[in-house]
Amino acid sequence: MAEICTTLQLGSTGDQVKFLQQKLREFGYYSYFPDGYFGPITESIVIQYQTDNGLYIDGVVGNQTWTSLGIIDCTYIPFSCSTITVGSVGELVKWAQYFLIQNGFYSGVEDGIFNTTVENSVKAFQTSVGITPPDGIVNPQTWTALGLTDCTRYGCVPNWQCEQPLNGFENDNCGTIRPSTVCSCVPNWQCEQPLNGYESDTNCGESRRLNSVCNPICLEPNCGILITSSIAD
């Protein structure tokens, strides 16, 4: 049964505050580990988020702010800290990067990409705490040593977005990434001949669209907007 997201404000505590902090972190606003305490720092970050997104600015997280974050369900969903290694991507990798930074073994960005730089940082950390062999794989033993044993998530409504530049994957606001043929198709817009102000995309089967590149004198307000092929000619 879905759990309603309650109104949160200064002084609130608990799992839903952790969830809020996690979502603000995924949106690039909260740079700390979610601790479940809605203090002055969380309040100021909420105010900044509301300001940037045209919401009512009061530092209180009600229905409008929850919805803006893409959340309509705060159901607790147990989520173990699974093993990650080179090639892994997503929110778990960000958590590993965050804790490696906190422990002084990583100085890169928290981009959710487990590359060889992250692997070497993991190996150095494992060596420092006596994990043998230091294989660069973040398994339950390494998660515990880093200080994270619970990677719990909450109910989340996926909002799949194509990666930019297009690389064949989508990501969502729930911290997961998946392959997608929609995103893997790289548009190949071609100017019509003779020039008539439109382009067609032969690779992805898109409808034609107005484009000022093909028609430099195009002054219509919808230049560059995708339109249906039935009105292209």
Image (cartoon, helix red, strand yellow):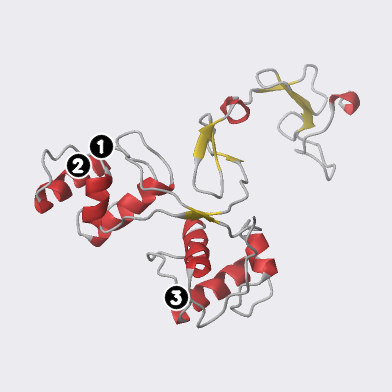
Which element carries disc 3, helix, strand or loop?
Answer: loop
Q: Nearer the viewer, residue 176 or 114?
A: 176
- Which numbered marker is on residue 116? 1
Q: Residue at x 63, y 29 (%)?
A: 182
Which part of the image, by quadrant, shows the C terminus?
Answer: top right
> Which residue is at 62% across, 61% downward?
3
Seen at 64% across and 57% down, the residue is 2
Front residue of 171/147: it is: 147
Q: Earlier in the sequence, mark 3 or mark 2?
A: 3
- Are there few (<14), some (14-19), or many (20+) residues within 10 Å of tag 2? some
| Residue at numbered disc 2 | 120
Label 3 belongs to which residue? 37
Does the image show residue 29? no
Whichever of callouts 3 and 1 sits on the residue coming sooner in the sequence is 3
Do the residues under discs 2 and 1 have CB atoms within 8 angstroms? yes
- Looking at the rendered image, the disc whose residue lies closer to the viewer, 3 or 2, is 3
